[in-house]
Amino acid sequence: QKEVEQNSGPLSVPEGAIASLNCTYSDRGSQSFFWYRQYSGKSPELIMFIYSNGDKEDGRFTAQLNKASQYVSLLIRDSQPSDSATYLCAVNAGGTSYGKLTFGQGTILTVHP
Amino acid sequence: SAVISQKPSRDICQRGTSLTIQCQVDSQVTMMFWYRQQPGQSLTLIATANQGSEATYESGFVIDKFPISRPNLTFSTLTVSNMSPEDSSIYLCSVYESGAERFGSGTQLSVL
């Protein structure tokens, strides 16, 4: 069964620290990996996506992908209270180049002042 | 990026009735999807809305319960039929654009 696993948290970090969010997936054929942020009562908002092994940086966010270990992570540098949200990892189905996302359960992040 | 509008934003419905949710995009997109997010849960893909042909449903979802229309490249509807309290969820449409899926604002459905 295709699965995406995340620690549900909550993960609590102080303001200014680095928050590290982790995700593992079971479908070795998956090619695209996504991180979304969801505030309570709102729809998911795309943070970034990564296709290749290694790191991809976008502002305070860095996504890391290791296909051999079937592992993808998101680092948030200089965490702010406004980063407090649920972070969803999503993986596309193997053999597809778009869509058909499988989501993890999400990690609740709390950034305290 | 595309602006994705969903209507209604929320509704309270009676058991046994049906609700049609609309998803409008401000640009033409090839791929549109419908998801369900049950209370306290993550997102589950219901179906891919194909323009000009029948939707492609995921395991556990059937056309009789969730009929989908996609008359053109900017619009789709999802109907939740013969509703029960178990259908109380947030329903989200998404579009594939510039390498990733982006979501509409969602429809919060409560079934009494």
Image (tube, rainbow, N blue to C red):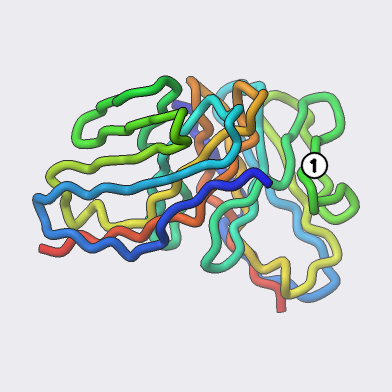
Residue B24: which quarter of the image?
top right
Residue drawn at x 47%, y 50% as measured from the top left: A43
Residue drawn at x 41%, y 52% as measured from the top left: A38
Most distant residue in the right direction:
B64
How many numbered marks does the figure carry? 1
A43 sits to left or right of B93: left
Give the percent coordinates (x, y) of residue B95: 58, 32
- Quadrant into which the N terminus of chain B falls: top left
- Quadrant into which the C terminus of chain B falls: bottom right
Which residue was labeled with disc 1?
A: B57
Residue A110: which quarter of the image?
bottom left
Give the percent coordinates (x, y) of residue B21: 69, 51
Most distant residue in the bottom direction:
B112
Residue flagged by tag 1: what amino acid is it? Tyr
* Residue B64, placed above or below residue A71: below
Most distant residue in the front direction:
A68
Q: Chain of mark 1?
A: B
Residue drawn at x 61%, y 21% as measured from the top left: A97
Give the percent coordinates (x, y) of residue A57: 25, 27
* Residue A32, placed above or below residue A10: above
* Residue B42, placed above or below residue B46: below
Residue drawn at x 65%, y 24% as measured from the top left: A96
* Residue B43, placed above or below residue A24: below
A19 or B9: nearer the eye?
A: A19
- Local packing at callout 1 (Cα closer than 10 Å; few below 14, some 14-19, many 20+) is some
A63 sits to left or right of A24: left
Residue B17: which quarter of the image?
bottom right
Callout 1: SS = strand
B96 or A78: nearer the eye?
A: A78
A42 or B37: nearer the eye?
A: B37
B86 sits to left or right of B17: left
